Image: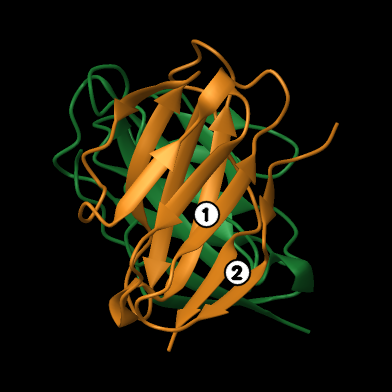
Amino acid sequence: DAKTTQPPSMDCAEGRAANLPCNHSTISGNEYVYWYRQIHSQGPQYIIHGLKNNETNEMASLIITEDRKSSTLILPHATLRDTAVYYCIVRVVGGASGSRLTFGEGTQLTVNP
Amino acid sequence: EAGVTQFPSHSVIEKGQTVTLRCDPISGHDNLYWYRRVMGKEIKFLLHFVKESKQDESGMPNNRFLAERTGGTYSTLKVQPAELEDSGVYFCASSQPGHMIGSQFFGPGTRLTVL
């Protein structure tokens, strides 16, 4: 699976948009971009995933650049409950190892009141 | 719908003892995964079941770890004998059958402390 690079930490004011970047310059054509988060002492939580088109769900939006070498997770109106470590994961789908998630160090997002 | 559940939530054992962790996936989820985070490290994949079969066990650290999923429902992860470096949080996740690109739903984890 392609390696991802994320900033170690970010801060955001409550009610503002949180934009979390991720670089995945070695991504292959059959690899998806996934975002998970881990709130302290809980299990990782799925947020969103995409292949090449931008995606939106009730939690967030995912913007993938045209060359697919980077992406941004957007939390449109961050709340204190969004404070967590956010993981950007690039994942090959299919094959013997196609199901595993490879977690990096992620970005610690702190939403401030 | 109940989520992924794990038992126990915490376990404290002495080096050399045996511990068995249990995971109950979401009903109907054929895919079951084990991950763990040891102190100061990243979350690492251990293995993947499809129903009762081990699809990928390449992440299992050594033969002291044994995972089973008899009947394709709940799974157990046994550590025997436990070593100090096995301390960490063990997560279980499940996903829908045949849904390779779908999301994995994680349980709350079992915090294992080996003294």
Picture coordinates of residue B36 (x, y %)? 41, 59
Residue depicted at 53% across the width and 26% down the height: B70
Extreme left residue here? A26
Seen from the viewer's position, the closer of residues A11 and B112 is: B112
In this image, B45 relative to B51: left or right? Answer: left
Relative to B51, residue B21 above or below: below
Q: What element does badge 2 sit on?
A: strand
Crowding at mark 2 (Cα within 10 Å: few <14, some 14-19, many 20+): many
Q: Quadrant of the N terminus of chain A?
A: top left
Q: What is the letter of the orange chain? A: B
Extreme top residue here? B98
Which numbered circle lies on residue B12?
none
Whether residue A101 is visible here, answered yes or no, is no
Report the chain holding disc 2.
A
Picture coordinates of residue B89 (x, y %)? 49, 67
Whether residue A3 is visible here, answered yes or no, is yes
Per the image, the residue denoted by label 1 is: B91
- Residue type at numbered disc 1: Phe
Residue depicted at 23% across the width and 22% down the height: A96
What color does chain A have in the rendering? green
State how far apart marks 2 and 1 are (Cα).
Answer: 17 Å
